[in-house]
Image (tube, helix red, strand yellow):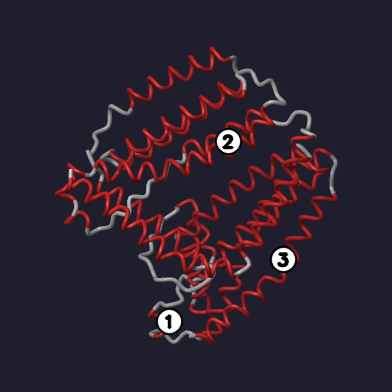
Amino acid sequence: MSHNRNLETIWQQRAKAFRKETMPYFRYMGQSGFPAFMSLILISATIGYFKLIHHLPVGFPIATVGVIALMLVLCWSPLRTWLSAGDTVFMMPREAGMTGYLRLSFRYNSLACVVLAACVLLLYLPIYNQGAALSGGWALAAAAAALKAANSWGAWKERQMTWPGMRRLMRLLRWIMTAGALAAWLTSPLWQAAGFTLLIAVLAALLYRLPSMHKLPWERLIEEEAKTRKRYYAFFGLFIDVPTLQSTTARRSYLAWILRLVPYSSRNTFIYLYTASLLRTEMGGIILRLLFLGCLITYWFAEAVSLSGYGCVIVFAIFMGLISVQLGSLRHVHRYSVWKHVYPLPESQRMKQYLKVDRAAMLICALLLWLFILLPLAISGVYVPTLAAAALSIIYIAIRPARLRKKLMKEQDEE
């Protein structure tokens, strides 16, 4: 019993140490004006939300919006364990007593996830009640709670799986089954939805018995914790220099053709380098996910012609801002690389070519988002919001290089 309490004390000490470690960075983030920017976005979103629920457009995809919004928060099941590589030596011999340690991790993460899911559900219920609402709000809330618990259990089982391919397959199936269960609760009578959910639960229970599993997936938990810490520091790196963490890359073969468009010559060295970094680092993955989500939500708002078509322009501006913030961290990727001092490449060339990559990336993202405004609004015969979004993006992309150049010059002076 004392050994278990000792492990729980270690968990609490590590959680406290991480909070103490990141607190200064939160202060720097607060001083940067980012909270004010997010407050403006929140105010705009709140105004748009209340206008939406008071004047819900005819044909609004209530069930589709509910499935996607609820699926995202119900399936997302992170786990902070504070484990590190050294624990495979020092803590693995005490694996039998790790139950209390992991219980604290589950409790810590479950509380935040449940609060987030409850907030999304409460925001969705006024929209849901304007539709058929076949199951009723309380039944939907009970179903969401059960699905959240089932997803937490499924996510833990996936972490225990031996083979990464099987883990990814089961995660995909879990998301699909959750979407199917939500669709049933949003479009079918109560008894049909409950019966369908029960069948899915039985199927999931059988499927999760098939793969081979570790009792305690040390390597997986350590890797997940390292990725979470890296995301924190990547975010803090947008506001101030942070300790360098080990970088990870992904091939993303579906985007590799873009690199072949860059002429292979010394004068394009930095263009090739920053393009490859953008395509292969985790930052590129974040931008791709933001772009996909932005296109999807922009299309919904444009198809519904919400706020006379300006609802999609607001969404467009929000996602352009989020993508620009993420893309701004590209300038830090090779800031402390040794090779810059080894090869005779002019610093002015690095800055100029970095700005070209940034401008091209912003232009491509803006164009893709803008197309999802243009097509639905053109079908509805609305054109002014489309022109407003185009003008907004052109103005921002035109002034962005000068702002980035000032930041780069300031960082060079500090070095």
The structure residue drawn at horizontal position 28% and vertical position 27%, both measured from the top left corner, is 209
Residue sitting at x 56%, y 64%: 327
Residue 68: image tag: 2
Of 329 and 7, nearer the camera is 7
Q: CA distance from mark 2 to mark 3?
A: 30 Å
Q: Secondary structure at mark 1?
A: helix
Q: Residue at x 60, y 19 (%)?
A: 135
Q: Is residue 10 left or right of residue 229?
A: left
Direction left: furthest residue: 93
Ranked by sequence position, the earlier of labels 3 and 1 is 1
Distance between the Cα atoms at labels 1 and 2?
45 Å
- Element on which disc 3 rests: helix
Residue 353 point in image, percent of width and height: 57, 75
Q: Which residue is mark 3?
A: 396
Name which residue type carries label 3.
Tyr
Q: x, y percentage for residue 201?
A: 41, 22
Give the residue type that dot 2 points to.
Ile
Residue at the farthest top position: 191
Decide which of 255, 75 is in the foreground and name it: 75
